[in-house]
């Protein structure tokens, strides 16, 4: 099977796209063409796939041109942003839309009439769970993922300042929206926190190991389940989340749910700092649940099988 995977929005090293879906297809022996903004993000394409460079947030015309190049000989197209969905060439193989954001039910139903749509019910959110991560420490807390106003940047910076007298450091691992970058640079310049910028997911997960807790802060405008919670669980970290991640944290008992307020997050961090037994218990519960339900290698074969079905590729054709 030849699959084309396309995005104009995401970093080419996006964990869900590159390190889960594409890697699963390659490991299963399929050919993959990856249409992504490699130049914009200064990324060298991974070995084993065919790369087509496209501008970040490309116009519909340029996105369509990149898709035409990427679709030569393809049996299946998987798109990861709505811009690509609007730029589909007339001649194309079956199309799958990997939908991450919340959309209105009517719009979802319309998309499902025309294409296959991947939701968390079709391909579960997952992570790479460490076999035996170190126990949580007590000197730093960590946040993995994109940084923006709606994802609590102001509160994170305020928290970092309040943590200094308690000997706890804040590590921020992720790209930032343009409007909050000056705030983060200023906070790092005066020594309040460490901001590492974008780090490939597999490295970011290792960097998080041994932290006191993983933070997932978001306001009410963020309507998707933060996948970073699974990342923290997979690395044995207690989770401190705002209500957007409450369902997973409360279901598994792996952390604490707090309002999006600096005082509330600070109190949760300090409670865990003073209670190493509780830290270890929450981290262990989250890790066990992640290994049971959210370890990507356990879901990879099912994803590949679905992709083959969507493409209309039979077992006989694969064997040949």
Image (spheres, rainbow, N blue to C red):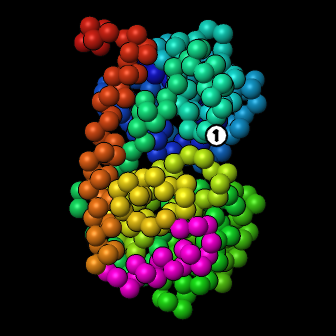
Say if 116 sits above or below 143 in the image. Answer: above
Q: Which residues are magenta?
A: 258-276
Image quarter of residue 252? bottom left
Residue drawn at (74%, 69%) of the image: 182
Say if 292 sits above or below 75 in the image. Answer: below
Residue drawn at (33%, 34%) of the image: 300
Check the picture and name the quadrant holding the N terminus. top left
**Count of labels in the image:** 1
Residue 12 position in % (x across, y down): 54, 42
**Mark 1 falls on what kind of element?**
loop
Residue drawn at (38%, 54%) of the image: 251
Instruction: Tell me if residue 241 is in the magenta stretch.
Output: no
Residue 132 position in % (x across, y down): 23, 62
Please rate how many residues cluster around mark 1, counting C-alpha atoms within 10 Å: few if below 14, some from 14 to 19, many from 20. some
Check the picture and name the quadrant holding the C terminus. top left
Image quarter of residue 25? top left
Q: Relative to the observer, which residue lies in front, 185 or 265?
A: 265
Q: Relative to the observer, which residue lies in front, 235 or 8?
A: 235
Left/right of residue 162 with respect to residue 288 in the rendered view = right
């Amino acid at each position: 099977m030849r699959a084309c995977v396309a995005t104009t929005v995401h970093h080419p090293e996006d964990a869900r796209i590159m390190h889960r879906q594409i890697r699963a297809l390659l490991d299963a022996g399929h050919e993959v063409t990856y249409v992504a903004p490699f130049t914009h993000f200064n990324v060298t394409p991974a070995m084993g796939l065919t790369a087509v460079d496209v501008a970040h947030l490309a116009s519909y015309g340029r996105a369509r041109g990149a898709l035409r190049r990427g679709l030569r000989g393809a049996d299946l197209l998987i798109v990861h942003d709505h811009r690509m969905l609007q730029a589909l060439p007339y001649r194309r193989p079956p199309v799958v839309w990997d939908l991450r954001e919340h959309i209105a039910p009517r719009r979802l139903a319309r998309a499902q009439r025309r294409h296959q749509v991947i939701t968390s019910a079709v391909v579960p959110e997952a992570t790479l769970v460490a076999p035996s991560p170190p126990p949580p420490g007590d000197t730093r807390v960590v946040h993995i993922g994109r940084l923006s106003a709606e994802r609590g940047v102001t509160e994170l910076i305020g928290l970092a300042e309040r943590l200094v007298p308690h000997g706890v450091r804040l590590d921020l691992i992720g790209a930032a929206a343009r409007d909050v970058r000056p705030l983060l640079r200023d906070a790092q310049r005066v020594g309040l926190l460490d901001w590492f910028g974008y780090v490939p997911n597999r490295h970011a997960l290792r960097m998080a190991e041994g932290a006191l807790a993983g933070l997932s802060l978001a306001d009410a405008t963020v309507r998707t389940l933060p996948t970073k919670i699974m990342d923290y669980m997979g690395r044995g970290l207690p989770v401190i989340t705002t209500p957007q991640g409450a369902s997973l944290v409360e279901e598994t008992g792996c952390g604490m749910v707090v309002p999006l307020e600096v005082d509330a997050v600070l109190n949760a961090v300090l409670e865990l700092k003073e209670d190493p037994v509780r830290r270890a218990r929450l981290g262990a519960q989250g890790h066990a649940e992640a290994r049971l339900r959210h370890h990507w290698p356990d879901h990879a074969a099912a994803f590949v099988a679905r992709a083959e079905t969507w493409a209309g590729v039979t077992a006989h054709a694969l064997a040949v």
